[in-house]
Image (cartoon, rainbow, N blue to C red):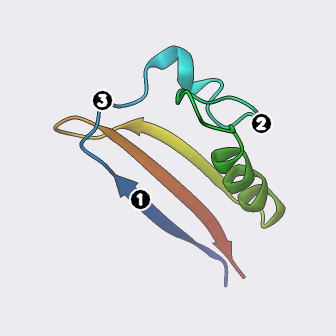
């Protein structure tokens, strides 16, 4: 059968504002002064190559929640 594995990781930081959510997984985008902007773009590309997705949302109680979904064959 087929299914899905989901991994969610949350933090209690400032979160990710709505404008940044559209760009956060693009190469070269970083909100950090010394950031390269490659980390999340690599995660997104690897998820895509495996038929999955990664997204970001608000964490209940504050912060960000990143969710990685991968299919199970």
Viewer-nearest residue: 52 or 23: 23
Instruction: Determine which residue is flagged by label 3.
Output: 14
Q: Earlier in the sequence, mark 1 or mark 3?
A: 1
Please tell me how crowded label 1 is: few (under 14), some (14-19), or many (20+) other residues with Cα within 10 Å. few
Task: Identify the disc placed on residue 54.
Answer: none
* Residue at the limit of the structure toward the front, as seen here: 34
Residue found 22% across the figure and 40% down from its top: 60
Task: Give x and y (percent) for residue 4.
Answer: 58, 70
Q: Earlier in the sequence, mark 3 or mark 2?
A: 3
Viewer-nearest residue: 18 or 28: 28
Task: Identify the disc placed on residue 8.
Answer: 1
Viewer-nearest residue: 73 or 56: 56
Residue found 72% across the figure and 82% down from its top: 73
Task: Give x and y (percent) for residue 42.
Answer: 73, 53
Task: Give x and y (percent) for residue 44.
Answer: 70, 50
Q: Assign the N terminus to one quadrant of the image.
A: bottom right
* Residue at the limit of the structure toward the top, as seen here: 19
Please tell me how crowded label 2 is: few (under 14), some (14-19), or many (20+) other residues with Cα within 10 Å. some
| Disc 1 secondary structure class | strand
How far is mark 3 from mark 2, CA to CA?
Answer: 22 Å
| Disc 2 secondary structure class | loop
The quarter of the displayed image where residue 48 is located: bottom right
Instruction: Determine which residue is flagged by label 2.
Output: 27
Residue found 46% across the figure and 65% down from its top: 7
Residues marked 2 and 1 touching at CB (< 8 Å): no
Q: Earlier in the sequence, mark 2 or mark 1?
A: 1
How far is mark 1 from mark 3, CA to CA?
Answer: 17 Å
Please tell me how crowded label 3 is: few (under 14), some (14-19), or many (20+) other residues with Cα within 10 Å. few
Is 18 left or right of 61, judged from the image as shown? Answer: right
């Amino acid at each position: 059968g087929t299914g899905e594995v989901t991994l969610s990781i949350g933090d209690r930081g400032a979160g990710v504002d709505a404008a940044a959510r559209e760009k956060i997984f693009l190469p070269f985008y970083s909100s950090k002064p010394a950031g390269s902007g490659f980390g999340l773009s690599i995660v997104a590309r690897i998820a895509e190559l495996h038929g999955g997705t990664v997204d970001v949302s608000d964490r209940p109680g504050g912060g960000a929640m990143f969710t990685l979904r991968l299919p199970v064959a």
